[in-house]
Image (spheres, rainbow, N blue to C red):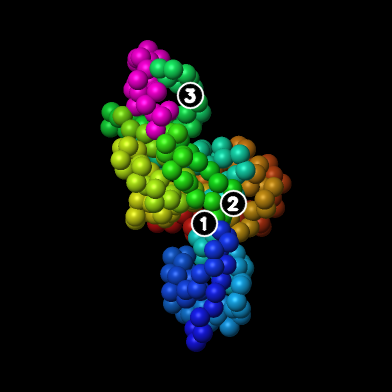
Amino acid sequence: MKHRVEIVKSSGETVPFSSLRLADSLRHSGADEATVNDILQKVEEELFPGISTREIYNRAYAMLKRKRPVYASKYKLKKAIYELGPTGFPFEKFISTLLQYSGYETRVGEVVKGKCVSHEIDVLARKNGKTFLIECKFHGEEGRNCNVKIPLYIHSRFQDVKSADNGEGAGFSKPDEGWVVTNTRFTQEAVAYGKCAGLYLLSWDYPEDDGIRNRIDRLALYPITVSTLLSQREKHFLLSRDIVLCRQLIKDTFFLDHLGVSENRKSRILKEIEDLCRI
């Protein structure tokens, strides 16, 4: 870039356009250097002061989709997580399924008795003899970060459940650790409180190199919403049937028949998600 161009983030904040950041996100999609450089050049030529990050994303996404759909699918991963809304329940199912592929036993939406009151827990997980109480904070809009109020509230729920005399007869043992999971980011104050209170925080990019994005890429556990070929109606139908991962649709292709998808289109959809799930 010859001149500094100010762009507008989803939060409304104005920041300088970063060609390095865009290039990194394109590389993360699996695109080769020639494709990265070509898209970067075209985006830079069309920049203007005040352009939104959403518009920049849309342009890069459209070019990637023309090059190779699987690149576009990985590039839209963050947006695909937002598409798990609006209720947040599919996000809870997604986190539960993500943990299952890492060896956890999980249950979603369990009501557990605390010392003072009962609590509906988003995800209860168990691994290596330890029990984890996991609360998910889903944001359906970009630019909304998870502030300190969320871990404060969840820590109080964790302490109430931990203080209760539930016993193994209730099918639940005292939690060893409380988790806060969000699809956006934590503020610095939220991270500081989480560390001090002994909560495990998991967000889009936290912990560093082990956030939601890293876990999805490492295990190739992409949500069904990354598909560039499925319509919104079809995605909502699959989510309502607890098909939250591309891997699940590969195993249960009869759902596409139920949707009335033609054989030709079915073949293209499965090719797209099979390419994505290769690790």
Could you tell me which residue is drawn at 44 percent across and 77 percent down? 33
Task: Locate residue 59, reporting x and y percent.
Answer: 61, 71
Whether tag 2 and tag 3 are in contact, CB under 8 A, the answer is: no
Q: Nearer the viewer, residue 112 or 262?
A: 112
Residue shown at 57% from the left, 40% from the top: 88
Q: Earlier in the sequence, mark 2 or mark 1?
A: 1
User: Residue 131 appears at what percent x and percent y?
Assistant: 34, 29
What residue is disc 2 on?
141
Q: Observer-nearest residue: 153 or 227?
A: 153
Amino acid at pointer 3: His
Mark 2 near mark 1, Cβ–Cβ under 8 Å?
A: no
CA separation, marks 2 and 1? Answer: 14 Å
Measured along the vertical axis of the image, is residue 203 above or below residue 120?
below
Q: Provide residue 26's location: percent of width, then percent of height.
A: 48, 69
The crowd level at tag 1 (other Cα within 10 Å; few <14, some 14-19, many 20+) is many
Residues in magenta?
Answer: 155-175
Which residue position holds label 1?
A: 77
Disc 1 is placed on an element classified as helix
Q: Nearer the viewer, residue 77 or 159?
A: 159
Q: State which tag comes first along the sequence, 2 or 3.
A: 3
Q: Quadrant of the C terminus?
A: bottom left
Identity of the residue drawn at 50% across and 60% down: 74
Q: Residues within 10 Å of mark 2 (few under 14, many from 20)?
A: some
Q: Position of residue 175 (x, y in %)?
A: 34, 27
As measured in the structure, the alpha-carbon distance from the residue carrying label 2 to the one carrying label 3 is 26 Å
Does residue 195 show up magenta in the picture? no
Left or right: 170 in relation to 69: left
Could you tell me which residue is drawn at 40 percent across and 45 percent down? Answer: 190
> Can residue 10 be spotted in the picture?
yes
